[in-house]
Image (cartoon, grey):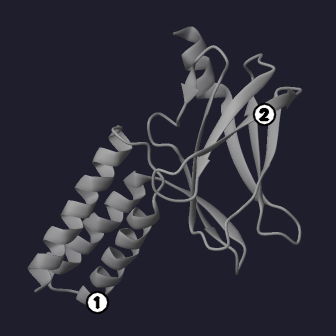
Amino acid sequence: MNVLMLLLLCTRLELFFLKDSPDLMVRITSEVKSDRVQLYYSFKGTDWDTMNLSANNNVFEARIKAPDKFKLIGAYFAYPDGVIDDNKGELYLHEISISPRMILPFSLSQLEVMVDQAKSKITKHTHVDEAVMLLDYVDEMLGELPYVENTMIELNRNIIRSNIENLRQILK
């Protein structure tokens, strides 16, 4: 249990664009002594790729070949002893834009807040057009969202989608 707590406190995942390339550099920094880590990543849905990373002073790096079109990347990783770091069940999620180049971390919790904001606008009948735009954005993100089947992130994704559908019914 102490190792798990240490992982949650001392592990960091970062993403960077490679110069003149849509590909990404992923860097995992860990205070835990390990010579390798297995990275799992996905650009959409439940299609996960994996690669083994070797350490260089407890820093693991990998170049990820990006598909032609993508908006999101989700990642988690596992240590040889079986400990999995999935960002407390939320996965490491990032929204990515090629032009302009930006990488923004986000979570399902943030998407839930957007749905709540849309609900408030709809129930108060103020700025309903903004509410529709928020719902469209969240729905698009959920359609692309990488997730692991039969986990809390899939359940939460489905709940948010249901809430969006309910709000769309109110708008009709």
Q: CA distance from mark 1 to mark 2?
A: 46 Å
- Residue annotated with mark 2: 53
Residue 164 falls in which quadrant of the image?
bottom left
Compared to 148, does 81 lie above or below?
above
Taking the spot 19% from the left edge, 70% from the top edge, the residue there is: 165
1 and 2 marks in contact (CB < 8 Å): no
For the residue pair 20 and 1, the one nearer the viewer reads as 20
Residue 107 screen position, x and y as percent: 46, 53
Q: Amino acid at mark 1?
A: Asp
Kindly tell me whether residue 127 is visible in this rendering: no
Residue 45 screen position, x and y as percent: 45, 56
- Residue annotated with mark 1: 129
Q: Which element carries disc 2, helix, strand or loop?
A: strand
Taking the spot 35% from the left edge, 76% from the top edge, the residue there is: 134
Q: Which element carries disc 1, helix, strand or loop?
A: helix
Residue 172 screen position, x and y as percent: 10, 86
Report the side of 63 relative to 87 (left or right): right
Q: State which tag comes first along the sequence, 1 or 2.
A: 2
- Name the residue at the top extreme: 1
Report the side of 130 relative to 141 (left or right): left
Residue 130 falls in which quadrant of the image?
bottom left
Residue 145 falls in which quadrant of the image?
bottom left
Label 1 neighbour load within 10 Å: few <14, some 14-19, many 20+: few
Q: Amino acid at mark 2?
A: Leu
Of marks 1 and 2, the one in the foreground? 2
